[in-house]
Image: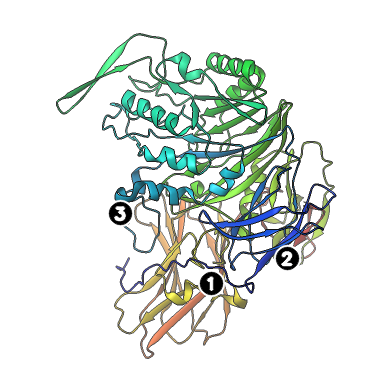
Amino acid sequence: MASLSGCSQRIQRVIQDAAGDEAAVTGTVTTGGDPLSNASVTAYRNGREIARATTDDDGTYNVSLGGFPAWVRFDHPECSSVTRAVAPGSARSIKLNSGEESVSLAFGGDVMFGRRYYEPRDDPLRFYYRLQPTDRRDSHDRLLDSVSPLFGDADIASINLETPLTTSEWRHPSKAFVFTSHPVAAAAMADAGIDYAALANTHAFDALTPGLEETIESLDRVGVAHSGAGSDSTTAIAPAILERDGVTVGFVSVTTTAGRQYERDWAADETTGTYTVNREDETLTVRDSAGVADATPETIRAGVEAATDQADVVVTQIHGGEEYQRTPTRELQDLTDTAIAAGSDLVVNHHPHVSGGLETRDGALVAWSMGNLFFDQNLWATYRSFILQVTISPDGIQSARAEPILIEGYIPRGVTGPLRDRLTWELAGLSDNSFMITEDTLVYQPDDERPTPEQLALDGGGQRRVRGWVTDSDDSVQLGRERFLTGSFDDHDVDSDAYEGTLWRYGRESRSSDQPIGRDGSGGIELVRVQANENRALFSPWNRLPVSNKEFTLSGSYRTNADGELRLLVSWYNDTSGSSFQSQEMSLASTEREWTDFSLELERPDEATHIDVFVFLSPPDGVDILRAAFDTLSLVEWEPTEVAGGRQFDVIRGSSGATVRVIPVDGEVSWQ
């Protein structure tokens, strides 16, 4: 691939509130059927309050978001508060529940603040967040600002802290991958509203006993509770007990990844043995008794029973399963059943780094994998995540919902619009029928009557989902999944960057970074070359996408301002890195400033496991400036026709008159 030059710096725009003429969010706040007056409605972006309003006597509100998505918090002294990611111009009706004898919990996934957070950027077209060693505390604060409204909203917020917080240079002698993060992260987490950290995981003992001891000291210093690791097995399995508004919650943390495959594991053992580790001219003696709580049926029962003796509600967190697999392993299912049988009301699992489904299991609520929250991985599957919000009382689980999150540049972002819908539907496809989609949110509805499927006749060609999921279909109908999460380039994520082309690599040019340039006023993305440029401009997804099926459709809209060389390249790979082994290229003709659609049918080679798509614009010949704008880019992966239904599919195609059966959402079925 040609080298890159002439790419402008990434434009970052901090949106300031205008004097009432920006798009606002409106709606009502109720306590069920009754309007709630004097409720506060506060909008936040990047940890900063940007607007505030109060509901009228009829419960209505109007608050400006400055034209871009924001976190909006709804609260009242007599009710539990609610925070949502909201798009400007939308209407959002919110129900607040009485705060009496109820406590709100928020669960995030894997958290680590090391490794690539400090590495220099090696791709000039790709943004990611960097922690500054000279400004560590403020850097961590800014990083955590992205989701602090959600954690601050909860009475108890929990994460899986998959890293020691330490300055120690000791490292585990056997592990290939070790993580450490700076102790200042503890204070930043506390200020962001995090109350509890699960420590039984793959990396808590990476810096051996000095690292674990400093981690515990750092958390204790700022009042973040923890469990799952300690100086001995009894301490490691002991639950953390937190109390809010008269309701006590017990947190148990265990892991299946305590190094069973190594000569020196990091499970907390009932032993007095030691081993030594050498580093340069120093020797460290490590106690075998120190480490993390190993996930065995015996330890789980001991931890849960101890928590049950002290708490109204018991949460067990199991770090286990298979990395990058959304479905739980048999071992994880068995351990989850053990935790439930012992008395757990809620089982929250993590380790795969990808989000899994939600379900009710023998009366308990189960999250099979929370995915990442703060982590530095560069795989498409790890960018999708969520925060689980649960309301409890002394009697157990009252309600639950999943707030979708997109990891962009190692930062979790709230999402709105079609991006939110796509992430919510994907999570729904992994969850059981006790979770249903209401408006744009996956919510726990165990006792609600299930809607009756409706029959939908196709008009011929393809149709995209607006509302409703396919339960079964004719043999001639194909179901598809959209693989480009952000192909419209609209501003759907909660941050201060306007039209930044979320999850796409390209050289930012000011015109396409602070205003919509797409079709019909949508976001769009633009490549620009002038005669002085020597190399082609390009854009592509951040990473090559994993693929498994045979058929694909690549499509989109584009326009150019003049004749020039504009090319589309599709490359196939057999790994996440390395060169492509097969490609196909097509030229896109000049459109003379008119929007034009294109579509390309693709067939995956047998050896291919990944696909990538590139658009190249060469320097102009005959004009001073050559521009090429793109919008509504789509890559649909089609299932074989024998796949008849599923919540995760958002595109269907078939001959005119072919039928599918569709489950309504909020009483509506709509495919266009």
Q: Which label was assigned to residue 120?
A: 3
Q: Is residue 516 above or below residue 146?
A: below
The amino acid on which the numbered mark 2 sits, given as a three-letter code, is Gln
Crowding at mark 2 (Cα within 10 Å: few <14, some 14-19, many 20+): few
On the image, the x and y values in percent for residue 267 come to 41, 19
Residue drawn at (30%, 27%) of the image = 172
- Marks 2 and 3, the one that precedes in the sequence: 3
Return the residue at label 2. Answer: 672
- Marks 1 and 3, the one that precedes in the sequence: 3
On the image, the x and y values in percent for residue 325 come to 53, 38
Query: 74 or 671: nearer the eye?
Result: 74
Instruction: Using the rendered image of the protein, determine whether residue 570 is visible from the camera's viewpoint.
Output: no
The amino acid on which the numbered mark 1 sits, given as a three-letter code, is Gly
Look at the image and tell me in which quarter the C terminus lies. Answer: bottom right
On the image, the x and y values in percent for residue 394 come to 72, 26
How far separated are the C-alphas under marks 2 and 3?
A: 44 Å
